[in-house]
């Protein structure tokens, strides 16, 4: 269909730009997650022992994301391409090997059970419409045209966003709108985010958070 083919092209473009990932050692990654690297705080201090994160604090769930996506985000925080002072402070001492190790650890963990929140039906319905159909009168593609059926993610370039915390999703969409996060290959997320109103951002975040977590389809080792 039209939607799929239009963004299938983008998928091909972003994929060909990805660098090959060195093999990560999940056991070494676990040490960093639990104890830290001696400089930054241990990952579990914020992301939790099961990697589920904390909604209110804006700490994302990590298991279920592909290893390559996790490693790319850590590199982007380190270089400043993705701008977040908390993550920069805790990750900038990691070496390339430590980055792939900790990414392998989180990508290999079972997906945690996420808290269920009650959300008004109307909000969920608006969120569902935008996520599954978009609004072509405003050139707003369906989130699923890139993030895949069920927003479960497609390879390492398009992360799964189903079952992610609402606060985190909201903060990311705001960050793209404001140009604070500008690290995806073609800057496509800012084009999506700037077309959404505040109410629509709330609705897609609430709808996605209410969906079951789906482990990444490929990308993870
Ligand atoms: C002090 C709290 C804290 C610590 C410690 C911490 N994180 Fe985070 N992490 C966050 C916050 C807050 C965000 C969201 C930042 C943003 O909005 O970009 C985040 C985001 C991330 C992301 C991006 C996820 C995504 O879906 O794009 C990854 C990957 C990540 N952290 C990995 C780690 C790893 C690995 C460690 C340990 C080496 C770690 N974090 C330690 C708070 C923390
Ligand atoms: C044209 C393709 C495309 C469309 C359409 C799209 N996204 Fe994305 N999205 C991406 C890409 C690529 C990334 C990864 C960015 C990166 O590498 O940092 C992403 C990342 C995200 C993330 C960050 C996930 C994380 O773990 O940090 C969120 C949240 C998100 N998108 C939400 C949405 C929502 C909500 C919609 C629909 C309103 C949407 N996206 C539509 C391509 C798209």
Image (tube, helix red, strand yellow):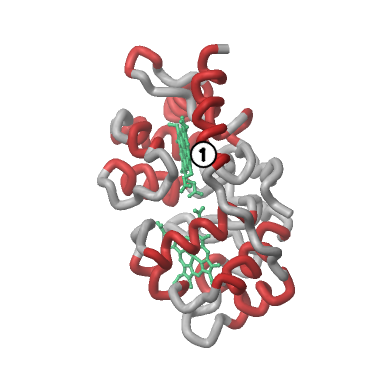
Residue 190 position by quadrant: top left
- Looking at the image, the residue that sits furthest to the bottom is 38
Q: Residues within 10 Å of mark 1 (few under 14, many from 20)?
A: some
**What residue appears at the point 38 percent right and 23 percent down from the top-left corner?**
140
Which residue corresponds to the image point at 37% horizontal and 32% vertical from the top-left?
192
**6 is higher (above) or lower (below) than 214:** above
- The percent position of residue 206, horizontal first and vertical second, equals 47, 38
Quadrant hosting residue 177 = top left
Can residue 171 be seen in the rendering of this structure? yes
Q: Quadrant of residue 43?
A: bottom right
Q: Which residue is mark 1?
A: 14
Q: Secondary structure at mark 1?
A: helix
Residue shown at the point (38%, 57%) measured from the top left? 82
Q: Nearer the viewer, residue 129 or 116?
A: 129
In this view, the residue in front, 5 or 181, is 5
Q: Is residue 34 above or below residue 155?
A: below
Q: Nearer the viewer, residue 216 or 121?
A: 216
Q: Is mark 1 within 8 Å of ligand 2?
A: yes
Q: Position of residue 221 (x, y in %)?
A: 74, 54
Q: Where residue 100 sits in the image (x, y, percent)? A: 62, 66
């Amino acid at each position: 269909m039209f939607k799929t083919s239009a963004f299938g092209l983008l998928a091909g473009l972003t994929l060909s730009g990805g660098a090959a990932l060195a093999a990560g050692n999940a056991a070494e990654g676990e040490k960093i997650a639990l104890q830290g690297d001696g400089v930054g705080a241990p990952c579990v201090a914020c992301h939790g022992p099961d990697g589920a994160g904390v909604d209110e604090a804006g700490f994302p769930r990590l298991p279920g994301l592909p290893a390559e996506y996790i490693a790319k985000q850590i590199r982007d925080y380190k270089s400043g391409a993705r701008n977040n002072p908390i993550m920069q402070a805790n990750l900038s001492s990691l070496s390339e090997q430590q980055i792939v190790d900790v990414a392998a650890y989180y990508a290999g963990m079972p997906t945690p059970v996420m808290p269920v929140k009650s959300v008004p039906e109307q909000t969920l319905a608006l969120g569902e419409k935008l996520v599954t159909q978009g609004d072509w009168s405003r050139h707003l593609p369906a989130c699923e045209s890139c993030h895949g059926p069920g927003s479960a993610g497609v390879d390492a370039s398009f992360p799964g966003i189903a079952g992610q915390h609402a606060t985190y999703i909201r903060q990311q969409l705001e960050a793209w709108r404001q140009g604070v996060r500008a690290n995806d290959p073609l800057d496509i997320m800012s084009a999506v985010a700037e077309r959404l109103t505040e109410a629509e951002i709330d609705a897609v975040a609430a709808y996605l958070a209410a969906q079951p977590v789906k482990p990444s389809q490929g990308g993870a080792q």
